[in-house]
Amino acid sequence: MEEHKFLNFFSKHWSKLLLGFLAIASIAAWGERFFSSNRSQSQQDFVVAGQILERFQNGETLPIESIETTELILKRHPELHPKYDMMLAMTYLAHANPSKGLPYTKASVGNANQDLPAFYKTYANTSHLIAEKRYKEAYSQAQALDVQLKNDDAHSTLYALNLLRQVSLEMEIGSRSEAWEQLKAHPAFPSIATLFQEGSLLLEDWHSLRLNN
């Protein structure tokens, strides 16, 4: 029971972190393009969709009605998918429906690929493998990214996140490395660990449980 509790805790926050990263990349990359859309399209749809996005960016968990409204607008204006796909992915995750959110995540990253730096593309694509439970492939990609980022100070935080990803994947595939020790020594560790804290449960607690099982 104790192990199940910790695994659920980590799984919930890890998913939010992954999609949160992708949301920032996607919205930042495509924000300007939305406002340059064809002026002949329905302004009312744009206003409604914009209001829903604003609520999402303000931290609200959108109700199902807002999801359905946004999906209807996207059917009428498919060119808006790059702006709203990640919002839908994260909302479906919040409603415990990741299977419906995954296609939107893939589409969002695919649309933003030309704007994302190469390291972030690799990190995002590995997220897809994790969502599909292709853990060995994901671990291989994470290790390859680790080699590329090791001496790159410009992507220090991404390097730390990738270390944490390796630690979580090692639990899935039954492997061990020095990723956890490297992460603990990384300057970004305190801020990353805070993202996974819930009440008295800490990231270190999850790792200790992993070591004892």
Image (tube, rainbow, N blue to C red):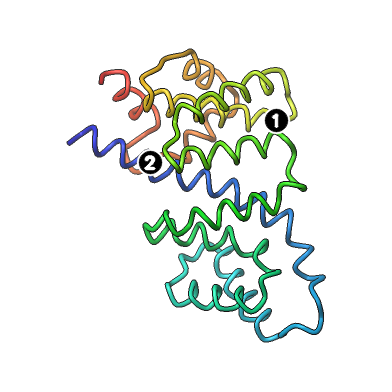
Taking depth in this image into account, of 88 and 107 the one nearest to the observer is: 107
Instruction: State the quadrant of the N terminus.
Output: top left
Taking depth in this image into account, of 164 and 78 the one nearest to the observer is: 78
The amino acid marked with disc number 2 is: Ser
Give the labeled residue for mark 2.
11
Element under disc 1? helix
Element under disc 2? helix
Instruction: State the quadrant of the C terminus.
Output: top left
Q: Is residue 28 above or below residue 146?
A: below
Task: Locate residue 47 relative to residue 59 in the image: left or right.
Answer: right
Q: Which mark is residue 7?
A: none
Q: Residue at x 75, y 68 (%)?
A: 34
Q: Residue at x 37, y 57 (%)?
A: 96
The amino acid marked with disc number 1 is: His
Crowd band around label 1 with a 10 angstrom C-alpha radius: few (<14), some (14–19), many (20+): few
Q: Is residue 144 above or below residue 108?
A: above
Task: Locate residue 43 relative to residue 139 in the image: left or right.
Answer: right
Crowd band around label 2 with a 10 angstrom C-alpha radius: few (<14), some (14–19), many (20+): some
Looking at the picture, how far across and down is residue 109, in whole percent?
64, 49
Taking depth in this image into account, of 60 and 37 the one nearest to the observer is: 37
How far apart are the two marked residues, 1 and 2, measured between alpha carbons? 25 Å
Q: Is residue 28 above or below residue 50?
A: above
The single residue placed furthest to the left in the displayed view is 1
Looking at the picture, how far across and down is residue 192, in whole percent?
52, 35
Looking at the picture, how far across and down is residue 191, in whole percent?
54, 35
Q: Residue 65 appears in which quarter of the rendering? A: bottom left
Q: Residue at x 71, y 85 (%)?
A: 42
Instruction: Kindly indicate whether the residue at mark 2 contacts the one at mark 1 (C-beta within 8 angstroms).
Output: no
Task: Locate residue 62 relative to residue 52 in the image: left or right.
Answer: left
Q: Earlier in the sequence, mark 1 or mark 2?
A: 2
Give the labeled residue for mark 1.
155
Q: Residue at x 20, y 34 (%)?
A: 2
